[in-house]
Amino acid sequence: MKVFITSIIPEVGIELLKKNDIEVIQNKSYLPLEKEKLIKKAKDCDALLCLLSNKIDREIIDALPNLKVISNYAVGFNNIDVEYATQKGIWVTNTPDVLTDATADLAFALLLACARRIVEADKFTREGKFKMWQSDLMLGKDLKGKTVGIIGAGRIGQAFGKRAKGFEMKILYYDKKRIQKFEEETGAKFSSLSQLLKKSDFISLHTPLTKETYHLIDKKEFNLMKDGAILINTARGEVVNEKELVNALKSGKLFSAGLDVYEFEPKITKDLLKMKNVVLLPHIGSATIETRNKMAELAANNIIRVLLGKKPLTPVNKL
Ligand code: GLV
Ligand code: GLV
């Protein structure tokens, strides 16, 4: 049995595959493979271990006749044509749970960085501008008692809510369904999207990218927000209309924004790069040593199980 790995991933995952007598073919580069090259290299593989930056479409799926499992090294799987894989009897798996806390931590780090202007203040200090203590230097926003709106209360959204509770914030959440346990644990209140947008001082996005969530935050939604709101996005860039985000930052509608993901990733809208009131990260939500190792193990174990004829641990489709 053969697996093709599209990029560099932690060694633990590779060792695990080899220990199970799976032949590993790996593209030892960080650059996303072009489609033709990926097809050529993965041609006779039984399993594909890929990243969120690999678009796995019909053409690729059709070109790999032995493929039994597509193991995504990410929790989000909008990069894969899951419907088509399912039609062809191919498992698609992701890496949930293991990255929940790391990603919620990063979202909260962005919230704090935006509220207290951490990055801007660091730059100010490095530039030698700290000459005296000033009563109005780098004034930010309090968290305690403020309302945070969580859009998408899945695993990561709920973990983010627990952190917000620790900072004594009020929580609103918008999701397809009510989640009793989350409400009991954090005091979070279920809300419509429009009420959440109107009432929240901070808004954090935790939805997957689907047809329904594409541009969920657009011109109309920015207009509904409170003046001086702070928006955090660690989910997927395409959930926000980035052009309207720039307008909301320019007009002062938003106090600031903390972004880990971008609509045209890895391209970043030029205007954002010039703004002081945005914190821009290179999609590092799950980037801790422990979490990335666990993701590699889980991605490998999903493959091992399928190649042994078993159901994978964390499938996203049903066969
Ligand atoms: C990262 O964005 C992931 O989906 O795991
Ligand atoms: C600030 O440094 C203070 O002591 O209030």
Image (cartoon, grey):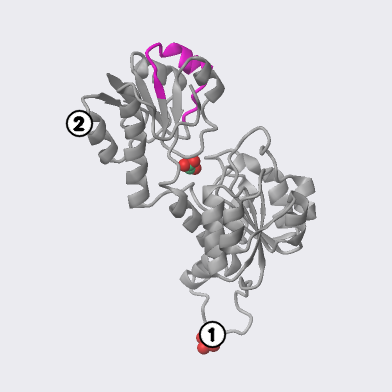
Q: Residue at x 53, y 85 (%)?
A: 132
Res. 156 in view: yes
Check whether the beta carbons of the residues at disc 1 and disc 2 lie within 8 A of each other: no
Residue 189, relative to residue 153: is it above or below? below
**Foreground: 233 or 20?**
20
Q: Quadrant of residue 183?
A: bottom right
- The residue nearer to you, when weighing 131 against 206, is 206
Q: Is residue 113 visible?
A: no
Q: Residue 231 vs residue 48: left or right?
A: right
Q: Residue at x 56, y 22 (%)?
A: 83
183 vs 14, left or right, is right
Residue 303: where, in percent of width, then height?
34, 28
Which amino acid type is marked by label 2?
Answer: Lys
- Residue 140 placement, left or right of 280: right
What number is the disc on residue 19? 2
Q: Identify the image quadrant of the N terminus.
A: top left
Categorize mark 1 by other alpha carbons within 10 Å: few (<14), some (14-19), many (20+).
few
Q: Which residues are magenta?
A: 54-69
